[in-house]
Amino acid sequence: MSTAPQGAPATAPQGGPTLLTARGIDKHFGAVQALYKVDLDLPAGAVTCLCGDNGAGKSVMTRCISGIHAPDHGEICWMGEPVSIRTPRDASHLGIETVFQDLALADNLDIVQNMFLGREIVRRGFLDEDSMERAASKTLAELRVTSVRSIRQPVASLSGGQRQSVAVAKAVMWNSKLVILDEPTAALGVVQTRQVLDLVLRMRDNGLAVMVISHNLNDVFEVADRIAVLQLGRMVVQGPASDFDRQSLVDYMTTGTSSRRPAGSSDPDGAVS
Ligand SMILES: Nc1ncnc2c1ncn2[C@@H]1O[C@H](COP(=O)(O)OP(=O)(O)OP(=O)(O)O)[C@@H](O)[C@H]1O
Ligand SMILES: [Mg+2]
């Protein structure tokens, strides 16, 4: 289990080519060092689960990739080229869409209005409602989100799982290549969680890179092709999901190390156990 060294070919052991490579990301807020030299690889066609205890730095890392926070140091490469992601718009232009922990949907607007918020289709000075409805319906159908009664329903009237599905559909509608979901199932029941995990797998099967942040070990082992663990702002390990079991993942999340590392795996610094 290792983080690819700098200059390594842009391929990953699971999934397709590495879309996003972060190296040496530092971020502090006043006296709080939220991230220390974090390396992260996100390959296409794979689900990478970013795990860690409360306050480990998962959301801050997400916000650094999404153009909300500027890292203090470090480099982000997109398809092998260094990029500067200064705003969420920069991230969108690259094909990075994020569903944040608080979802950021507008309750008073309907599903179509939410999916096009800030990117409305306008024709001859008027909103092109038909085109937006068609595109929203198509995306929801592709993701097999069939439980909403009407795409003109206000988001306030949706269940937690339906809201999460709309947020995911909104993220994938914009030719996204990397979709990041911060705690997508935290507020959901069993059936709704299943629906969201199915969406994650469908995006992966469509060739997208997906990063899922989750505390829920069932969810992690259900969808992860790769697992990366942050502990107190440091990336302590990342590698194939098959290299982890529940106990080793908990060990890494809570102590930053594990004595249950399977044979053949290695520490992030490359030392083979
Ligand atoms: N805007 C901010 N200003 C100051 N400190 C912050 C800010 N955002 C995050 N932090 C701090 O950075 C650290 C990492 O926070 P982060 O939100 O990334 O944790 P997390 O791993 O997402 O946790 P959780 O699982 O609880 O969501 C914490 O100590 C947090 O208090
Ligand atoms: Mg968080």
Image (cartoon, rainbow, N blue to C red):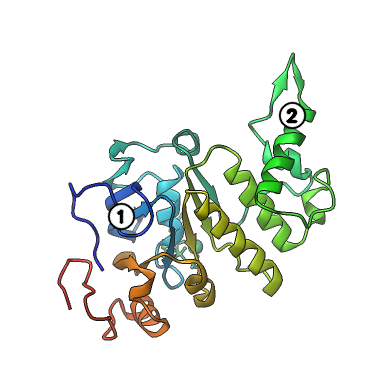
Tell me the residue that label 2 is attached to: 131
Q: Nearer the viewer, mark 1 or mark 2?
A: 1
Outermost residue toward the top? 124
Numbered badge on residue 3? none
- First in sequence: mark 1 or mark 2? 1
**In terms of depth relative to the viewer, which is nearer, 254 or 170?**
170
**In which quarter of the view is residue 41 placed?**
bottom left
List x then y, in percent, for residue 217.
Answer: 49, 76
Q: Secondary structure at mark 1?
A: loop
Q: Which image quarter is the C terminus in? A: bottom left
Q: Please determine whether, in this image, residue 12 is positioned above or below residue 117.
A: below
Tell me the residue that label 1 is attached to: 12
From where the camera sits, is residue 226 visible?
A: yes
Mark 2 Cα within 10 Å, few/some/many (few <14, many 20+)?
A: some
For the point 28% across and 40% down, the residue is: 80
Left-right relation of 105 to 261: right
